[in-house]
Amino acid sequence: MENIRKKIIIVDDNKASLTVGRNMLKTFYESYPVSSAAKLFEILEKVVPDLILLDVEMPETDGFETIKKLKADPRFGEIPVIFLTSKDDEDSEMKGFDLGAVDYIYKPFSGPLLLKRITNHLLIVQQKKDLKDYADNLEMKVRKKTMEVFNLQTAVLATVSDLVEFRDKLTGGHIERTQLYLQALINKMVEKGIYADEMSKWDMDFILPSAQLHDVGKIAISDNILNKPGKLDMDEFEIMKTHVDAGVDAIEHIMGETAEHAFLHHALLIAGTHHEKWDGSGYPVGLKGQDIPIEGRLMAIADVFDALISVRPYKKAFTHEEACKIIEDSSGSHFDPVLVEVFRDVKDEICAIARKIQDVV
């Protein structure tokens, strides 16, 4: 492809200098000679040059005022400006550089020197553009790769949770509902600034997908217990309780096999602590109060509410109103009182979610 000739505007009130300059440039560049700052800004409305050669000593508007106006206009501010001057004055030269000039060339100028200076500055501009294009392209690639990793991670979470729900035939829709309950609770917490310090450390991209793994350990529970058509006896319940440790072990095993495991941090806390109780009577460890990670305290509310309104072989479903009252009455015993107040604020929304996702009455 034929190279596009670079455009250069040369501004000088001296016609002889304009003619000399144009003759020096015409072999290599598309040049536009103009005799004043006013005419420069007229042509700039039609032509955007790659570089401007600007005389300092001009009547009406001199080079210093002209470059100020150029740099103040976002359309022209990045165009490199080389000053042309017959004055060998260090103060003027410093003023020009302060105003944004990239170079000074003294008149009368030699053709080879002028062309070399122009070539060097156009090369710098091109290198800056190439570097910016490279940085933009690299940023785009990083964003794309990050999104690919994120999608893979969320797909892993969803797939594993689907396996759990497929095995646990008694809890259809439970994972989807509890995830949406959590979303309603967390949105209200953010709105009210509740536990803001703790939540500031969360990765919000993964807190909700992580909730899907809260019962991942049920994979390790036999079908005879997991899908028993009746209430579990004491021994069976003790076995069922081991799903918490089994879930923690499974998540830790995955974390140990990959360097990209930060996305499982919330899942580990949720799976390991959502059966703990505020008063310390929960399992598997018997954590109490704020020793229970906030992720587990939130999941406890979502999990219990959904269990209450769901039919089980050993119990009927509670109405939404009954389930809400049980949650509220368990404030300070089973549940964090602060989070129960949040639940109270969004219980209508949570009940609406339960009605929409119909595997409950």
Image: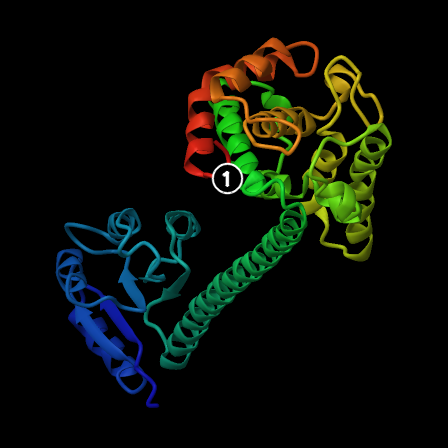
- Helix, strand or loop under label 1: loop
At a point 63% along the width and 11% down the height, the residue shown is 331
Give coordinates of residue 93: x percent, y percent. Answer: 41, 53
Q: Is residue 78 left or right of residue 316?
A: left
Of residues 103 and 288, the one drawn nearer to the viewer in this rendering? 288
Scheme of colours in the image: rainbow
Give coordinates of residue 61: x percent, y percent. Answer: 18, 50
Q: Is residue 101 left or right of residue 168?
A: left
Task: Decide: few, some or many residues near mark 1? Use Cα within 10 Å; few <14, some 14-19, many ≥20.
Answer: some
At a point 50% along the width and 34% down the height, the residue shown is 360
Give coordinates of residue 131: x percent, y percent. Answer: 51, 66
Outermost residue to the bottom: 1
**Residue holding disc 1:** 359
Quadrant placement of the N terminus: bottom left
The answer to which quarter of the image holds residue 348 is top left
Q: Is residue 48 above or below residue 199?
A: below
Q: Is residue 138 above or below residue 117?
A: above
